[in-house]
Amino acid sequence: MIETMTITLPDFATARRAMVDSQLRTSGVNEEYVLARMLAVPREEFLPADKAALAYIDRAIALGEGRVLAAPLFYGKLLSEAAPTSKDAALVVSGGTGYLAALVAPLVGSLAEIPADEAAKGTVAGSHDLILIDGAIERLPDGLAAALAEGGRIVTGLVLRGVTRLASGRKIGGQVSLQPIEDLGIPVLHAFDAPRGWTFA
């Protein structure tokens, strides 16, 4: 007699709904457009098969080679703060998974995506009304600030004295000033590490 083994796959749809109800709503993320996008985009598709079962835990998931899928709450808070509109030309600085771009794409007029390493060291093409950074940075490079249109918004994680915080800002008079909003666990994008002795102004 040949025995067969049945492999039960996780019920990702149920897990996604639980993520929204138990991680986002309970933490004050209630905007319908945010919840709709978080329900619509399958996090498991942005993970390797051996980590797909972890897709809806309330922590970041390290994927190796510097790539991390941040916790759901980070993306919920980021989208809530960003308030993207169909008039926005948006830029996503990717943490290496493509998940944030998938979340925001239907909410904006146009979307460009650039890897964090490129955004940190080079000139960023175009002029963007909204810049979203998929991780926490110690410094905002001049090239990335220059890519934000006058009056445009930026939402990112920010590393201040070793603590990661959600932060946002606008470009006014050619200058971008980031203001911390709340402490939040956010993967650090080390491409944006500040030189020793440098402090965020």
Image (cartoon, rainbow, N blue to C red):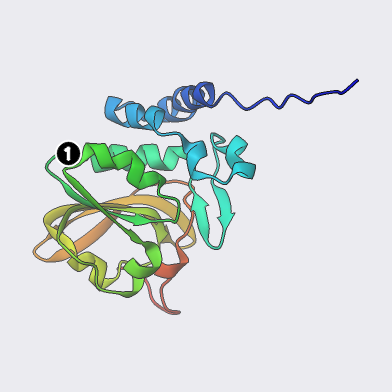
> What residue appears at the point 45 percent right and 79 percent down from the top-left corner?
196
Q: Which image quadrant is residue 179 in?
A: bottom left
Residue 121 lies, with reference to residue 9, above or below; the image says below
Q: Which image quadrant is residue 123 in?
A: bottom left
Q: Is residue 200 visible?
A: no
Residue 39 lies, with reference to residue 102, above or below; the image says above
> What residue appears at the point 23 percent right and 54 percent down from the top-left corner?
169
Q: How many marks?
A: 1
Residue 53 lies, with reference to residue 201, above or below; the image says above
> What residue appears at the point 44 percent right and 56 percent down from the top-left corner?
96
Residue 158 rendering spot, x and y as whole percentages = 38, 57
Quadrant where the image shows the N terminus:
top right
Q: Which residue is mark 1?
A: 85
| Disc 1: CA contacts within 10 A as few (<14), some (14-19) or many (>=20) | some
Residue 141 rendering spot, x and y as whole percentages = 29, 70
Quadrant where the image shows the C terminus:
bottom left
Secondary structure found at label 1: loop
- Horizontally, residue 15 falls left or right of residue 183, namely right
Kind of residue sitting beneath label 1: Thr
Residue 89 rendering spot, x and y as whole percentages = 16, 50
Residue 43 or 199: which is nearer the viewer? 43
Residue 176 lies, with reference to residue 97, above or below; the image says below
Q: Is residue 120 visible?
A: yes
Name the residue at the bottom extreme.
Answer: 196
Residue 88 or 77: which is nearer the viewer? 88
